[in-house]
Image (cartoon, rainbow, N blue to C red):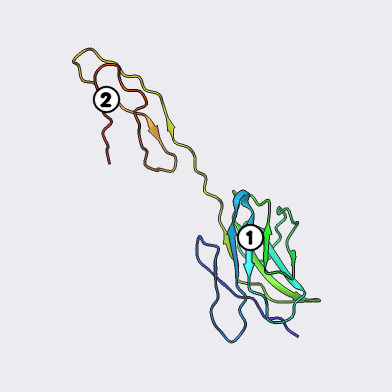
Amino acid sequence: MALTKIFMKVYSDSFFALCFPAVLFFLSLSATPCYGRDVSFTWTANPEQVDGYRLYYKTGSSGAPYNGTNATEGPSPVATGNVTTFTLYGLSDTETYYFTITAYLGTEESGYAEEVVLNPVPVNYPPTASDVTLSTHEDVPLTGVLPAGDAEGAPLTYTLVTSPTKGTAVIPIRS
């Protein structure tokens, strides 16, 4: 008996699968990132009897061989058992991962599902700012620069923490 090959469609920057109708049975696999770079997978059970599923993973580049080694559950492939959900723990948040799954019965194994790509977690560096102290003489207007920046280019919001003891301070909004 030949097992049904597993197929799926994955959208860019998403971990949800879309199954397309066809003559063959389509098994869908989706991965949802969790905290700590644990990745949870869910798929539809194969309609044919199976002993279980094997989850393959790797870093580096797309395609076989799937020779990942850094998940807590062990090297690729990880035998998930005869379940339709599974979580891999302990993955790096700085690596791109490639995942696929197969169904197996005894020594027979289906073909790989379409690959799911998990991109690195974007680094969000905090903005940087420098303290500024400005002073002037009475009745002499003063302008200054508030030195700050964001490595990712996100817009910054400025807040006056301490009002001046005499006079007024205004932080104009610039586009």
> Which sits earlier in the primary sequence, circle 1 or circle 2?
1
Give the label on residue 51, or none.
none
Instruction: Write down the quadrant of residue 79 in the picture.
Output: bottom right
Q: Residue at x 37, y 29 (%)?
A: 147
Are discs 1 and 2 less than 8 Å apart at CB?
no
From the image, tell me which residue sits under label 2.
Answer: 169
At label 1, the amino acid type is Ser
| C-alpha span from label 1 to label 2 | 51 Å
Residue under the point 69% across and 65% down: 55
Extreme-right residue of the structure: 106
Position in image of residue 114 (x %, y %): 60, 71
Q: Is residue 18 above or below residue 1?
A: above
Can you tell which mark lies on residue 40? 1
- Name the quadrant of the C terminus: top left
Classed neighbour count for the residue bearing mark 1: other residues with Cα under 10 Å, few (<14), some (14–19), many (≥20)? some
In the structure shown, which secondary structural element does the residue marked by tag 1 occupy? Answer: strand
Q: Nearer the viewer, residue 102 or 169?
A: 169
Mark 2 crowdedness (10 Å alpha carbons): few <14, some 14-19, many ≥20: few
Is the residue 65 above or below the residue 60 in the image? below
Residue 137, position as x, y percentages in the image = 23, 12
Could you say which quadrant of the image residue 148 lies in?
top left
Q: On the rendered structure, is 105 left or right of 141?
A: right
